[in-house]
Amino acid sequence: DICSDGRTTVSLFLNYDCSNQATRPKVFQRIISTVEQINNTKLESRDWINEEEANALRSAALKCFVTIMSSLVQWQNSRSNLRSQRSPQQQSNSNLRQSSSENNFLKPIQISAEKSVEKKQQSEEDL
């Protein structure tokens, strides 16, 4: 039930799994790993669980995984809907900020051919 809400799932991931603090447990990773182990382990070979119970456990684990993925999709869709409901002015301001930051990050480095040749000659002379 804890992962049926996408916002909670994302918060778990961001606050624990993405934390720089080594003491914080990787909660989301642990949930997914446990679900994966349940589905990949041959539980029937153990003496404490029969085949019917093992199948029920696998089914529950699969439902848990589907719930997590569905909640994340719903969370993403709700965020997309919020963005599409913004006023044109808000969208324009957001696009400008994003465009500006992208331009700063992706600026090509301009080096003239003359400077490149000079640097190459200088490095050859240094050898």
Image: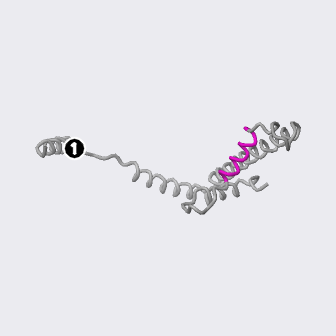
How is colour applied across the structure in the image? one colour
State which region is magenta.
28-40
Q: Pinpoint residue 113: horizontal percent, then vertical percent.
A: 20, 40
Q: Pinpoint residue 105: horizontal percent, then vertical percent.
A: 41, 51
Q: Quadrant of residue 127?
A: top left
Q: Pinpoint residue 23: horizontal percent, then vertical percent.
A: 59, 63
Front residue of 57/46: it is 46
Front residue of 1/55: it is 55
SS assignment at label 1: loop
Residue carrying label 1: 112
Front residue of 114/41: it is 41
Q: Pinpoint residue 95: horizontal percent, then vertical percent.
A: 51, 53
Residue extending farthest to the front is: 47
Q: Which residue is located at x 77 percent, y 36 percent?
A: 42
Q: Which residue is located at x 46 percent, y 52 percent?
A: 99
Quadrant placement of the N terminus: bottom right
Q: Quadrant of residue 27?
A: bottom right
Report the predominant secondary structure element of the magenta stretch. helix
Q: Residues within 10 Å of mark 1 (few under 14, many from 20)?
A: few
The image shows a total of numbered marks equal to 1
- Magenta-drawn stretch contains 30: yes
The three-letter code of the residue at mark 1 reads Ser
Residue 110 lies left or right of residue 83; in this view the side is left
Residue extending farthest to the left is: 125
Residue 65 lies left or right of residue 88; in this view the side is right
Residue 110 lies left or right of residue 51; in this view the side is left
- Magenta-drawn stretch contains 31: yes
